[in-house]
Image (cartoon, rainbow, N blue to C red):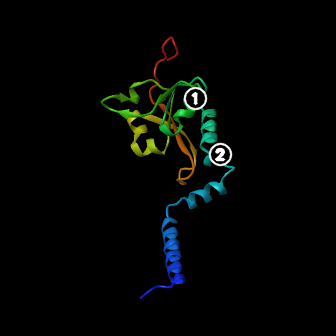
Amino acid sequence: PQLSQWSRRAIVLAALVGLCAAHVPGCGLRTLLVHWRHRDEVAYNAPRFARALMQEIPADARCSVDAQFLLDFYVSGRPTLNLQSMPKYFVTQDHPYDYMIVSRFGIAEGTAKLADGELIRTVGIRDDPFACYAEIYRPRRPFPRTPSGE
């Protein structure tokens, strides 16, 4: 039996609506709404959050910084070390730092525990996965400074 032209259009339209509906979960609507609702809050704007985070730390401090904020610290001209540990190649805790800035990634990886830092402050909203969050540590045993300041 032949379908009428209107029946075909109805089937195509229903298929398109179904396809669009299938893409709604995970398409970012919730993220968009959260960021729109909190658009003026520093914790929901990564560049502004990074600038506020840098204000918490002396400008000449040697900072070991997790990936989320690494480029912001580096571009600002601060003495910056990439906070990562790849035991065969590079171990952060073997390099001197005055402050360690750990983001959600570093917390999940246990980086702060590896470096044996002392938590001195938290910044941001830990319970909201859409907000920025960082923990600031200092070494339990301060690293000596060389004559060059390193």
The numbered dot on residue 86 is: none
Considering only order in the chain, which callout, 2 or 1, is on the residue closer to the N terminus?
A: 2
**Crowding at label 2, few (<14), some or many (≥20) Cα neighbours within 10 Å?**
some
Q: Amino acid at mark 1?
A: Val
Which residue is nearer to you in this view: 85 or 122? Answer: 85
Question: Badge 2 is on which residue?
Answer: 42
Which residue is nearer to you in this view: 47 or 145? Answer: 47
Q: Residue 46 lies in what quarter of the image?
A: top right
Q: Are marks 1 and 2 in contact (CB under 8 Å)?
A: no
Question: Badge 1 is on which residue?
Answer: 75
Q: Quadrant of the N terminus?
A: bottom left
Residue 63: x %, y % from top left = 52, 28
Residue visible at 55% across and 54% down in the picture: 128
Tell which residue pokes out farthest to the right in this image.
40
Marks 1/2: CA distance?
19 Å
Local SS, label 1: helix
Tell which residue pokes out farthest to the left in this image.
88
